[in-house]
Image (cartoon, grey):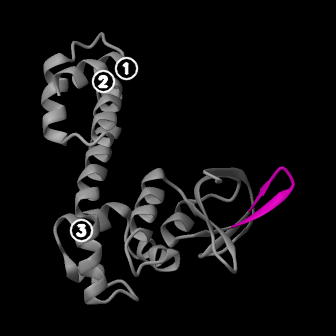
Amino acid sequence: MIAQIKGHVVEKNPTEIIIDCSGVGYEVKISLNTFTSLGNEEIKLFTRFIVREDAQILYGFSTKDEREMFNHLISVSGIGPNTAMIMLSSLIPEEIAAAIQGEDVRTIQSIKGIGAKTAQRVIVDLKDKMLKLAFSAENMFSANNTTRFDALTALISLGFEKKSAEKVIDKIDTGDLSVEELIKEALRIL
C-alpha cells in the first residue's frame, strides 16, 4: 500500500494532480479542499491506494485527518471513493464529523449525490467512530500530552472506553512514565 507521496507538482487540476517522484509521475485524485491547500513546488500527500477490477487509483489528502475521514466514509455501504471525495470537497473533515455526531441529516444530505437514506446510514455507521476521531483531534495539538495521548489512543484501539481509560491514565500518570509503562500499568487496572 502507498501511504504517502512526496515530490514536485507537474500538473495540478481541481480533481487530480500529477506528482513527479524521482522521475516517475503519479496521478493522484484529490478533493477540492486538498487542491486549495497545495502549493506549486514540492508537496507531500497522505494517500490511499484502491485497486478495483478495472482500475488502480491513488487518492491523495493534505492531512491525515482527511485521509482517515475518507477511509471511514468508504466503509459505509453505498459510499464509494468518488462519493467520499465529493463529500470531502464539499465539507472539511471536521464539518463532516460534527454533522455525524450531531445527527445532522440535512448537512450530509446537502452534498451532491447523497440522499436521505444514505445520509442516515452514514450517521448510524460512523457515529461511534467520530467520537474517537474527535478525541484524537482535541489531543493532537497539545505537545505536552504526547505520552498520555499515545497511551490513551492505544487503550481505545484495544477496545476500552475513552472515559474509563482517561480515569485510569489520570490516576497513574506521574509524568515520568514512558508510553509502554503507562499502557502496561493501565492494563493491570482495567
Residue 13 percent location from the top left of the image:
65, 75
Observer-nearest residue: 184 or 71? 184
Residue 113 percent location from the top left of the image:
40, 89
Residue at image point 41% right, 68% down:
75
Q: Is residue 43 above or below residue 10?
A: above
Provide the residue span drawn in magenta. 19-27
Residue 153 percent location from the top left of the image:
32, 37
Residue at image point 69% right, 80% down:
54
Question: Which residue lies under the disc numbered 3?
Answer: 100
In reply to whether residue 23 is colored magenta, the answer given is yes
In the displayed structure, does residue 187 sit left or right of residue 64? left
Indicate the amino acid at tag 1. Answer: Glu
Question: Which residue lies under the disc numbered 1?
Answer: 180
Q: Secondary structure at mark 2?
A: helix
For the residues bearing labels 1 and 2, Cβ distance under 8 angstroms: yes
Residue at image point 33% right, 16% down:
181
Q: Secondary structure at mark 3?
A: helix
For the residues bearing labels 3 and 2, Cβ distance under 8 angstroms: no
Indicate the amino acid at tag 3. Answer: Ile
Residue 188 percent location from the top left of the image:
21, 20
In whole angstroms, how far apart are the C-alphas of marks 3 and 2? 30 Å
Density class for disc 3 (Cα within 10 Å; few <14, some 14-19, many ≥20) is many
Sequence-wise, the earlier of marks 3 and 2 is: 3
Please state, as top left, top right, bottom left or bottom right, where the C terminus lies in the image: top left
Indicate the amino acid at tag 2. Answer: Ile
In reply to whether residue 97 is colored magenta, the answer given is no
Q: Residue 107: which quarter of the image?
A: bottom left
Question: Which residue lies under the disc numbered 2?
Answer: 183
